[in-house]
Image (cartoon, helix red, strand yellow):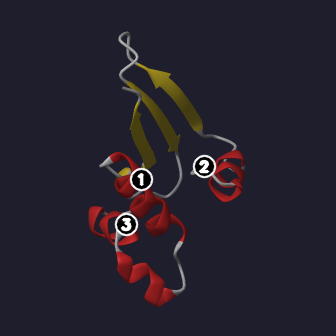
Amino acid sequence: MLLQDGPIHRMKSFKNAEKLFRTNDAYEFFRIQHKDNGIGMTAEKAAKLLGPAMKETGGIGISNTNRRLIQFYGQGLSIVSKPGEGTTVSFTIPIK
């Protein structure tokens, strides 16, 4: 299963975080979104998290999840963040 224990556990660890699980009226997709009010990050840092270069620094979780989403569904994670304003990480799984 794509949603392994690690991402779910990490989502639970944010006290002031918003989780969203939804679909559209035509049930064409299922969207999962996690939004927090943490320290945020630059767009460059967010883009780097999704790339294969993370393996060189010892981090593979988020880049591996992104790679698998692209492999299975044709689109990966979306990270929207701004320093000092938090981060929103989301992905969409097509149903049809």
Residue located 40% across and 63% down the image: 67
Q: Which residue is mark 1?
A: 69
Marks 2 and 3, the one that precedes in the sequence:
2
Relative placement, left or right, of 96 versus 86 is: left
Q: Position of residue 52 (x, y in %)?
A: 37, 77
Q: Look at label 3 and name its amino acid.
A: Leu
Q: Look at label 2 and name its amino acid.
A: Leu
Q: Quick one: SS at disc 3?
A: helix
Q: Position of residue 56 (x, y in %)?
A: 44, 89
Q: Which quarter of the figure has residue 16?
A: top right
Q: Which residue is mark 2?
A: 3
Any part of residue 7 in sight: yes
Which image quadrant: the C terminus? top left
Instruction: Give me the C-alpha separation between circle 2 and circle 3.
Output: 16 Å
Q: Look at label 1 and name its amino acid.
A: Leu
Quick one: 4 or 53, which is closer to the camera?
4
Q: Quick one: SS at disc 1?
A: helix
Label 1 Cα neighbours within 10 Å, binned few <14 / some 14-19 / many ≥20: some
Residue located 35% across and 52% down the image: 76
Q: Which residue is mark 3?
A: 50
Q: Nearer the viewer, mark 2 or mark 3?
A: 2
Q: Is residue 18 above or below residue 68?
A: above
